[in-house]
Amino acid sequence: MIKKFDQYRIFLCFIFVFSAACATTSNIYRDPNMDFGAIKSIAVMPFVSLARDNVAAERVRDVFINKLLSTGAVYVLPTGEVARGVARAEIANPATPSPEEVVKLAGIIKVETVITGVLKEYGEVRSGTAAANIISVSLQMMEAQTGKVVWSASTTKGGITVWDRLFGGGGQPMDKVTQRAVNDLINKLFK
Amino acid sequence: MNREPPIQEGKFSIAVLPIENLSGTRAPLKEIRESLIHMMGAKGFRILEEETLEKFMERNRIRYTGGIDKPLAQAFKNETGTGGVLITSLELYSDVNPPKIALTSRLVSTGEDPAILWVDGVGLAGDDSPGILGLGLIEDPKILSKKALDILTRSLGEYFGKKLGREHVQSVKGKFRPKTFYRSDVLDPDKKYSVAIVPFLNMSGRRNAGEILELQFIRNLKTFEQFDVVEPGLVRQQLLMLRMIIAEGISLANAEALFATLDADLILAANVFNYQDYQAVFGKPKVDFFVQLIERKSRSVVWSSVSYNQGDDGVFFFDRGRVNTSHAMASQMAQWIGEMMLEGSKRAQAAKVQAVDGNHR
């Protein structure tokens, strides 16, 4: 026979184990002291590409710039202007600038924030006979005055679903998956 | 086609430049040009004699045939007396059955201020209209080339006010709209804009995809009364003179220099990610690009859009509605962008008028 004390201990263990399932994790960081409503201009730096596709990072960057502009909330500098600023600020690696470089760049091209990004995955993934398109991106926003990170978020869209495993179909086209990922990131930015 | 006033024929002779090959493959350029000259001659156009053109090109050391700059336009006028120069670019050529061809031609005026008078293009595949039991299939590339050249010469004839038969009208389908876009209210639908198109960045695997898409925009923006497109030869000349290399898009400093030298109101730049045609039967064309338009006064981006389409988009039964060449697809995508630039501005204007009316009441 189990003693009453042991029963209590088992009950506590169950609570401890199953309460972990209720926990939520967030992949967004927002600086509580930053006034995001005051941001009027943004420079989007070239993204780091960890994918096999050579132009994927440029493509995702252009879709992101376009979506950001279409919100009407902020103005995004033309990519050529950002490139000019990078050249003038002599930034060796524009995809991963240091806080000092961000401050210098923002002074040249007159922006309030700078966004950098990493394209972690882009293209087709396979699992057994099933295949589908996937994208995984993470972004960081840095304040121009201090070079401090004020916002960071990541997203993953697409991938192989149960439907793909059962019926095939190859998942959604890459363009649509990219749009979904970019929409998700913008929603996280304006949350 | 455009809405410029037609020039009185008779006195107006045309110099047909050698065809610029953007197809990235070997093509019978000489034969295509001879057929074009023959067809134009048969339709009553005055063509500059071959020998005179050859001597002129030799004298002026012309190697680039994709456009003309100011000194060259002036030299054409003074030395040969021609009123216009016909610049033709071959965008696609495949003689594998079913054959495919895509051409864009434009007529540029000579003299002090060269301007695009007429521009049109055609993209055909042998299996565009197979018909019942495949009776409509075209298997001979020469027949297809003739058909394409006939469409172009008819369109040129219409520009000169001649009635030569069927009108070449392009229908635009909704599926070719940009997938996302940004449009500023700065664009005024009642104002006429001079647009300079800078070389597009080609990130696709297709050779010359930037130049090909640039031609599509020249052709389609020219169909709108509000847009006057600067001859690309002039843009090229200014880029060379200013020693400007557009490696990662156009900067505001570069844009300002071009605005000043070309007297343009807008600068159109783009990145081409995919421009794919296919050979033989299996495959589909794919076009994917990003466009930005910079305005002179506001020094800001007034239009930005992302467009991508495949030849079988929205096709469900019996290949109905399928597009077989990226030329035909890109042309409609560019047409949509032009329409939406102006349509959106009209809507914004209407909203402003409504707001003003509301305030008065």
Image (cartoon, coloured by chain):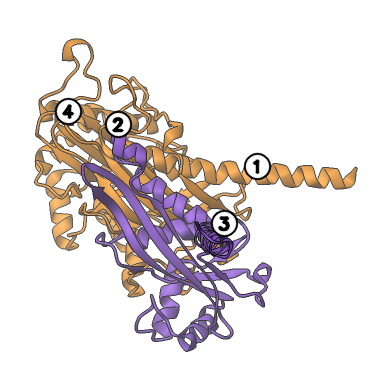
Of residues B308 and B345, the one nearer the viewer is: B308
- The residue mark sitting in front, 2 or 1, is 2
Q: Viewed as shown, does residue A99 lie left or right of B135?
A: right
The number of numbered discs placed on residues in the rendered structure image is 4
Q: Where is residue B222 drawn, in percent x and y? A: 44, 43
Q: Which amino acid does label 3 sit on?
A: Asn
Mark 4 highlights which residue? Answer: B144
Q: Is mark 3 on a helix, strand or loop?
A: helix
Marks 2 and 1 sit apart, C-alpha to C-alpha, by: 31 Å
Q: In which quarter of the image is residue B1?
A: top left
Could you classify mark 2 by the number of other residues whose Cα lies within 10 Å: few (under 14), some (14-19), or many (20 or more)? Answer: many
Tell me whether circle 1 and circle 4 mark residues in contact (CB < 8 Å). no
Q: Which chain carries label 3?
A: A
Chain that appears purple:
A
Which circle's residue, 1 or 4, is located before the other in the chain? 4
Could you classify mark 4 by the number of other residues whose Cα lies within 10 Å: few (under 14), some (14-19), or many (20 or more)? Answer: many
Q: Is residue A171 above or below residue B54?
A: above
